[in-house]
Amino acid sequence: MRPRPHSEEGRVGRSREEPAGFEEGENGIDEGRRRLVGAAVVGALVLAPGVSLIAYAEADGRRATGASSKRRWGLLIDTTKCKPSCTACVTACSSYNGWKNEGRPTDPQWIRKVQVTDPKTGFSRSVPVMCQHCANAPCVEVCPTGASFRRADGIVLVDRHICIGCRFCMMACPYKARSFVSENLTEQKPWAPRGKGTVEGCTLCVPRIDAGKVPACVEACAREGGGAMTFGNLKDPASALSRALAEYPSVQLRADLMLDPGVHYRGL
Amino acid sequence: MCAASRSQRGVRRMGDRPIILGALALLLVILAAPFWDGVLAHTGGVPPAIPAAKGAHCVRPTRWMLKYHMKLLMQLRYEAVHEGIRHKDESLPGCMSCHVSRLPDGKYPSVTSKKFFCNACHDYVGVRIDCFSCHTNRPDAAYRAMQEASRAVVLAHAGRPAAIVPGQAVSISSVSPRTQATRWRSRFWRSQ
């Protein structure tokens, strides 16, 4: 890249157009790149041991490309079907991801049942609350290392390899969705590594999603609970989730915060 | 008297020469230690005994893995965590399912034991890893079943070599999460 004249740098509100000479340079690079990409594609087709596998992977869509911004995973929780006594979702999450809550204040709670009551009317509902997988997640904004991040398909995760355990995200989250591991752990699940000194929270069962399955809580709710949870792609208008959202009124928790959570509740 | 002492000194000087040359040669050998180390490493030297693995072959040629397994692991880690690309067999639990087996007493070796696969070399080269305070350090039947059930997809993913020839230089483009985080932050501040 040719250096830009000094006077042109740092000017606020300037259009993205560059001087003519710069454009030429860019085209030159682009052509080179195009040739290189072409060669790479041909090379890949010749070298790849199973072209049919790649085609298959593309058809499958999820495993080949990983998380894609063409999807946004979300949940609809029908609180009218959620029984106060039922904790199937919590138990399923705990056993799949290998965390235990023994009631101590520092114990993890990836998902919990919350009894919400309107003090004026006495109207009360029991709702599961977990990471709401916000579009504008405050935990991501406050993270000083980039460990708290939002995947292309909208799942908010902690990369525990780079989490320093500062717990800013726990303070930033209005849903109290994250917890901190303060003790050494053993016998973690191979698909859900967890460890001391890092923050964790609902992953929407990301290994299951990547394998084409629904989250453990949704499965358990359908099997043992009232079938109150619908999982799906918010960006696909034909998905069961989008159709249900279009048909009935639903709310996001603390919608006033404009975080655009991926979890919607009906009947609150 | 004076002449005699001069001649004595002269004799002594002649006798010093092999000592000095010997010392110089020794110094050269010492200075070339990294070179000899490399030569020894490639011609055998004293390699640690690596515990045998199950399965016909590794996910990459063994000699390549000896040198670059850490790069592969970092790449797989980045792809799995951030991009959601999970490869069949190519994962840390996948490594465990082939490279860790029960000891004669029926137990799996502990992560601190010399019999644990990673430690065989890491103790030898003085590398300390912290993978297993979070990750599993033994084969897991449930994980295996999950892997088998999920359909195998071989990927020709950008940045990963399609074929690796032993003895040939291989470059893996691996962006460390720290670099990635810095990029994200700078992108974020630019957008403000």
Image: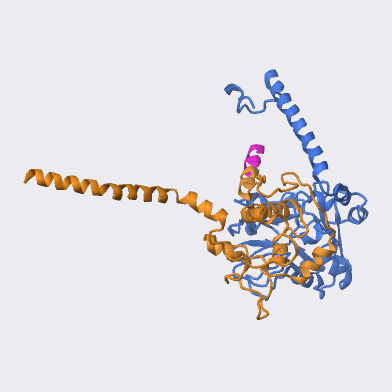
For the record, the magenta segment spans B185-192
| Position of residue B43 measured from the top left corner of the image (x, y, whole percent) | 56, 55
Q: Quadrant of residue B118?
A: bottom right
Please say if B40 is above or below B112: above
Q: Which chain is blue?
A: A
Does the image show residue B27?
yes
Q: Quadrant of the N terminus of chain A?
A: top right
Residue A239: x percent and y percent? 91, 53
What residue do we see at 77% from left, 38% from top?
A40
Left-right relation of B52 to A118: left
Picture residue at 37% right of the left edge, 51% below the top? B26
Residue B149 in the image: above or below residue B103: above
Percent from the top left, x then y, of residue A147?
64, 53
Extreme residue toward the top, this view: A20
Q: Which image quarter: residue B54?
A: bottom right
In which quadrant is the C terminus of chain A drawn? bottom right
Q: How is the image coloured?
A: by chain
Q: Main secondary structure of the magenta part?
A: helix
- Quadrant in the rendering for residue A224: bottom right
Residue A176 visible in the picture = no
- Furthest residue to the bottom? B105
Viewer-proximal residue, B80 or A115? B80
Chain whose colour in the figure is orange: B
Which of A214 and A111 lies nearest the eye of the viewer?
A214
